Image: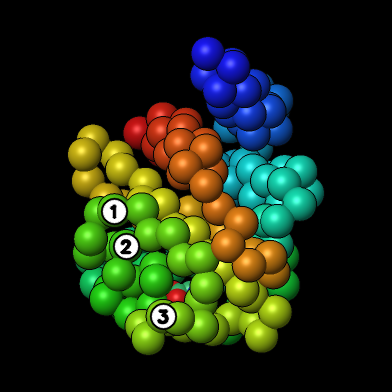
Amino acid sequence: MLAIIFEYFCTKISTMPFQKLKPEIKTILENDNLSVDHRLSQVCEVLKENIPYYDWVGFYFKNGDKDELKLRSFAGEPTDHTIIPFGKGICGQVAVSNENFVVPDVKAQTNYIACSINVKAEIVVPLFLNGENIGQIDIDSHTPDPFSKEDEEFLEWVNEKVAEVLS
Ligand code: SME
């Protein structure tokens, strides 16, 4: 019984920062006065500034009818990897797998595109519009193995809200 109560509170504490951020993200995305690109940039900034282990946050989308991703909005250091072919790196793999990809240790990955020597871990979550994988949110972390199921669920929620704006 004690273990169940302990687990309940641990889950509550670990999801707290995400629950607090949700209204702010909704407000940004619903702001018709800003372009969608501007709103996406603001979402990246809010995530990067409020979650200590989110050091780079970006949205990639399928580039027209090409089998490649194009960086649309980001917060953090500029990257050279603004175009990523499908299948290449963690992002390119998610473009074809349609599945979340959590990388606790980027050094252990063979199909990985390094953006900065400081990056230790990465999470990429696909973004679906009408069931189609049209893009993704990509987070780099300077902290080893920082991502949990709560991050995945939160980022899936963020992507659902973004899809509502894009539809
Ligand atoms: N590491 C990614 C490339 C994008 S950067 O993280 C910004 C990958 O392997 O696809």
Mark number, residue 94: 2
Give the alpha-carbon distance from disc 2 to disc 3, as whole Å.
14 Å
Q: Is residue 120 above or below residue 127?
A: below
Q: How many marks?
A: 3
The reply to whether residue 30 is visible in this rendering is no
Image location of residue 7, percent across then percent down: 56, 25
Crowding at label 2, few (<14), some or many (≥20) Cα neighbours within 10 Å?
many
Q: Secondary structure at mark 1?
A: loop
Residue 77: name its quadrant. Answer: bottom right
Residue 61 position within the rendered picture, expressed as x and y whole percent measured from the top left = 39, 59
Quickly name the residue at label 3.
109
Whole-Å distance between the Cαs marked 1 and 3? Answer: 16 Å
Q: As rendered, which of 158 and 54 lies closer to the eye?
A: 54
**Is the residue under label 3 in contact with that under label 2 (CB below 8 Å)?**
no
Relative to residue 103, is residue 108 depicted above or below? below
Give the residue type at disc 1.
Glu
Task: Mark 2 or mark 3: name the one nearer the start of the chain.
Answer: 2
From the viewer's perspective, is 20 left or right of 139?
A: right
Mark 1, residue position:
99
Circles 2 and 1, Cβ within 8 Å, touching? The answer is yes
Determine the residue positioned at 57% across, 68% down.
121
